[in-house]
Image (cartoon, grey):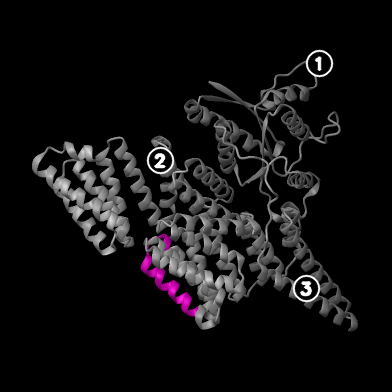
Amino acid sequence: MRTISVFIASPGDLSGERKAFREVIDELNAGFGDGAGVQFKALGWEDTLASTGRRNQSVINEEIDRCDVFILAMHRRWGQSAPDAKPFSSYTEEEFYRALDHSNNKEKPEIFVFFKRVDPASEADPGEQLKRVMDFRRQLEETRKVLYHYFDDELTFKKEVSRHLRAFAKGELPSTKRDREVLILPAAILEEVERAKRTAIRQMEEAKLARDAEREAYLKLESIQLQIAEDAAELSKQGKIEFARQKFAVLVVESTQIKVLELAGAFYKRIGDLESVVSVTQKILDVIGLDVDSITAGICFENLGDVYRLRGEMGLSEEMFRKALGIFEKHGYKSGIGAVYRDLGAILRGRGELRQAEQVTLQALAIDQEQGDREGESSSYLHLGLIYITRSEYEKAEESFKESLEISEEIGNDLSLSAVYGNLGTAYLGLKKFELAEATFKKSLAIQEVVGYKEGMASAYGNLGNIYLARNEVGDAEAMYKKCLSIMQDMGHAEGLANTFGNLGRLYKRQGDYSQADVMYRKSLAIEESLDRKIGMANDYCNLAILRHSTGQHDKAEELFRKSLAINEILGRQPAIMIQCRHLAITCALRENYDSAIDFTVRAIEIGEVLGDKEELIMLNELLSKLHEVKTHTNGASIENEK
């Protein structure tokens, strides 16, 4: 058994995380470690023995030199002052650079850096300790020698440490060499900020001429804040995300300008910092004050609904969307009404209420066309296509996506184009047009990488993984899925995590690793059930049932197939119902229940004839013939051989 020594360095404000780190080591050794043939050994200052006559830090440094993995965790503190550690200002800093030098010269240890998220208000007025941490983050971003990740609490820290150590033990760490990430913020908000700045400058000149010093000073501050917002957006475009983050942190605290705060909210959403999105949105609501029924308030509630959706808190998400809808209807704000209809349609689609989802999305489309809102119209066609994908109506989905694509190309909306390409590729995948699917997925990824939209990049990676898996290019598929998983975990994107776990389950099943496939499917199912996403639940039940067949648990397989069938009947997914009936026919036959097996096969054939699925019909008719033969002449042994 291979021993992997893991050293953790952190300042004194992360005692809970240090305890969580040791819990992770114990949990890995009790489960994963034995199966992978490794034993993890936790190291830190707590483990170094006192050595008379020697500098304590020297003893700790020897442990760093010997370790295989070095973990640095930081929050608000830089670390204990170290007068005997020059040129380093803290022992934590000395430990990090000791590990980095050793890694550069000896190719070990592997270094993982984790930062606990800090609220924008603290970053705006950091104090000496936090300022050093922020400077260090910027330095890591500039040099790009070590990648770093954010976490929210002890639980997410444990997940990150476990994920990285598992990847290290299996030799599956991604390369630390990557291009600088860029992030392009929404053009519409940037244009509004620019207009507001020009207006403020003009009004400032007017106040100066009118000798209104107080108003002139106010407008000067306003124009400066708008310029800082533009500067922050430019920094994010250059890939200097930490520099942009710190400028936005100051603005969130000091500015009361709605457009500045909206731009900050868009920035935090793009980098996946959902807590900061909530705090910025709450600041906008505070600025509005008593005007809680204004259109701006409605936009805030819609944004909160989107954040809760990403977190998987669907009840809160729907509550916020409906609150926004009430405000927009009161003001007759048609564009907002259409947008919320699309939002609600997405939630209904996830719950499997497809008829209602289609109805509200068609209402949104009608409003878009009435208003001449081409961007909204493109989005409505996109959402309709997603509903048809859920029903496995791929030709209708392709038609809707192409309508959306045409409009997006017309108005030059790159982010919308990327989303359409991604979903059009899914339709092509369903139609088994693999080359077209791959080409459109790559178009989507190229745009998402340019604008730096993490959620879109993850989706594109996952879609490409589906293509490679369909072509049995398992290694490439796994690489794509793991890129997708890494981003979704960083964002805490529940729906995306469920999809990715399901994809990894299919991949491990293809490789014959049924145990790992079972773990992935169960992770996916747990999330889908928490989200009440019926289509995902149906898929996971089906996948788990197929695994049960592999181990001869035909009674358990039948139970799971029936659960999947029941959900697909609610959803009205005829192709999926046909496939579930075929699975159940074989399962019932294996349990020597031939009458039920024949009934399920006949039902599947009836659906296949309606759908015109010739390949499936050939298979089903052969199965029906075999079932009649087995029922009449044998004891069921031949159906086992047939399977």
**Real-space Cα distance between discs 2 and 1?**
60 Å
x and y, in percent, of residue 533 in the image: 41, 56
**Residue position marked by numbered label 3 in the rendering:** 197
At label 2, counting other C-alpha atoms closer than 10 Å, the crowd grade (few under 14, some 14-19, many 20 or more) is some
Task: Indicate which label's residue lies in the foreground, 3 or 2.
Answer: 2
**Real-space Cα distance between discs 3 and 2?**
57 Å
Q: Is residue 147 above or below residue 445?
A: above
Q: Amino acid at mark 2?
A: Arg
Label 1–label 3 contact, CB within 8 A = no
x and y, in percent, of residue 300 in the image: 60, 68
**Residue position marked by numbered label 2 in the rendering:** 510
Q: What span is in magenta?
A: 348-367
Q: Is residue 424 above or below residue 134?
A: below
At label 1, counting other C-alpha atoms closer than 10 Å, the crowd grade (few under 14, some 14-19, many 20 or more) is few
Task: Indicate which label's residue lies in the foreground, 1 or 3.
Answer: 3
Residue most extreme to the front: 435
Q: Nearer the viewer, residue 206 or 121?
A: 206
The residue at the point 31 percent across, 35 percent down is: 551
Provide the major secondary structure of the magenta segment: helix
Nearer-N-terminus badge (3/2): 3
Q: Which quarter of the rendered picture does the C terminus lie within?
A: top left
**Residue position marked by numbered label 1 in the rendering:** 53
Give yes or no for residue 18 being in the magenta stretch.
Answer: no
